[in-house]
Image: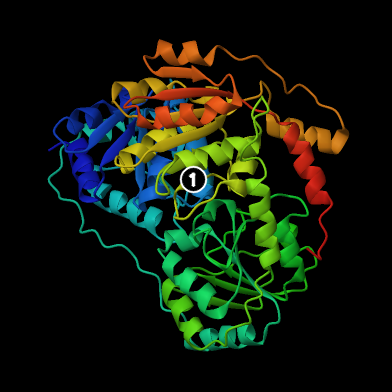
Amino acid sequence: MKAAELFVKALENEGVEYLFGIPGEENLDVMDALLDSKIKFITTRHEQGAAFMADVYGRLTGRAGVCIATLGPGATNLITGVADANMDHAPLVAIAGQASTHRLHKESHQVLDLEAMFLPITKYATRIVSPEVIPEIVRKAFKVAQTEKTGACFIEFPENIAEMDIDDVPLTVKNATPPEPAAEELERAASVISSAQNPIILAGNGIIRAGACHELADFAEALHIPVANTFMAKGVLPFRHPMALGSVGLQSNDYVSCGFANADVIICIGYDIVEYHPYLWHPSRDRTIIHIDTTHAEVDAHYSTSLSVVGNIRHSLNRIKAITSPHQGKAMRMLRDSLIQEMNLHRDDTEFPVKPQKIIWDLRTAMDLEDIVICDVGAHKMWMSRMFRCEYPNTCIISNGFASMGIAVPGAIAAKLAYPERKVVAVTGDAGFLMNSQEIETAMRLNIAVVILIWNDASYGLIEWKQKNQFGRTSNVEFTNPDFVQYAQSFGAFGVRVERTEDLMPVLNDALKRDTVTVIDCPVDYRENLKLTEALGQLTLTI
């Protein structure tokens, strides 16, 4: 068989369901081999869209999403999505065709050293230099991508190697399992937590990756310790849970930040410092920090851990819970109650353009609890992170490590492929939408029904928010938009513009029922941004 055929068999052996990408001259043999494979190729309209699809597929399933491009510009277009997956710890394997090895030593058409280029943004990057190494390279790439902390891997496949003959088979799939936590560290953690006066838990995305959400809920409830989650860990604890405080991450004197200021022991579970910088929630550098994760803590001056419990998170939580004395459970309830009051404040608001709080209220009301939102990056992300209630993990996907704009539309397509029985909504600003809106054609071609909710303010709203806070004026953030309704219709999708606030809920309900792509153009009143900043700034630690 050809080396390309062995390569595809190795992908099948890893359980690859979808391959996102664009055909090219230097991956011709792989593309041809895929015709005889059960792997479904998803032809995208841009390689960045393909990488984001693989990124979100990996986040939602725990299995590496796979994307492919040709050499040169095709490969460089993958970089943003690959970097996003790696920094947000989403398992992903990226593949790029390459020129013949006879051309790699010299200046040549479209040739770049892709292995070197992807090395800084992946856990593992390599070039296939002979057909015999294909089983080992593919197995290693998937093993590394799917082992904590999960992330991205890259394989460069020269076209002349892909054409060569080889008689071999893929390697047996064996994925790594996290080690068991050390007994002495469990006992030390239990002792410190038992003696704490005001402990608080910071829950990160690692809990979701470890499948430890139920264990966290039992741990918090049994010990009466309140839980704040990062943006990327929304739903790790149901919002209805008595110990749930909500999301932490706004760079302000937030409700939850007040909780951290009052805490003497901060228990960080499955927390990656890229999710929320430690200097923002631990500026004093004097609190006792307990690190519970599958790997050791990153070195950071504001994240100096007093002790670490490293190993299987589920087992760590269960064993610490069994030997720890519970607390009284005052649980900083006033913080959570204040957040709920804020969420409810604009539920019946009718002012137009629509306030962010009202958009979120209607969206949460229209969607089932297990439906999925893919949130793009921008001012809307701050509101969604803070106020969109989640009862289940991975129902609101937010990129907050690399935090790249443009993830929502391709991400929503991947989410629908991973969970076709659920409704999926891409929540995006007008700027982020146009960065990958070409993938609407992909969704229409494949009959993938998603809802795209555009928060339209004709501006880079988050940057405008920050400029006004810091300088009191704005600089070059405004732009004009196309007619989003006509734009949607040009793809054959359904487009609708919200003309009155009262129309938003029925528009959302109708969109979720349609068996096609619906683009909703919703004007948003971002004057609320500065009001939120002012309100948070007035908070005191006596809340």
Residue density around tag 1, few if under 14, some if 14–19, many if 20 or more, within 10 Å: many
Q: Quadrant of residue 267?
A: bottom right
Q: Residue at x 69, y 63 (%)?
A: 300
Q: From this viewpoint, which residue is outermost toward the right?
A: 472
The residue indicated by pointer 1 is 397
Image height of 520 relative to 373, above or below: above
| 19, above or below 368, in the image | above
Instruction: Indicate the secondary structure of the residue bearing disc 1.
Output: strand
Instruction: Please determine whether, in this image, residue 291 is positioned above or below residue 22.
Output: below
> x%, y% of residue 357?
64, 39
- The vertical placement of 128 against 107, above or below, is below
Please state which of residues 13 and 327 is positioned toward the viewer in this rendering. Answer: 327
Q: Residue 320: image x %, image y %? A: 50, 82
Q: Amino acid at mark 1?
A: Ile
Instruction: Report the coloring of the rendering.
Output: rainbow
Name the one closer to the observer, 279 or 71.
Answer: 279
Determine whether, in the image, residue 101 is placed left or right of residue 302: left
Residue 377 in view (yes/no)? no
What residue is shown at x 29% (from left), y 53% (from top)? 139
Classify residue 425 by image quadrant. Answer: top left
**Along the viewing direction, whichever of 156 and 243 lies nearer the viewer:** 243
Give the residue drawn at x 45%, y 16%.
Answer: 488
Q: Is residue 195 left or right of residue 131?
A: right
Picture coordinates of residue 393, whole percent (x, y): 45, 55
Q: Residue at x 54, y 50 (%)?
A: 389
Quadrant of the drawing holding the N terminus? top left
Q: Residue 498, can we see it? A: yes
- In the shown orientation, is residue 37 left or right of residue 389? left
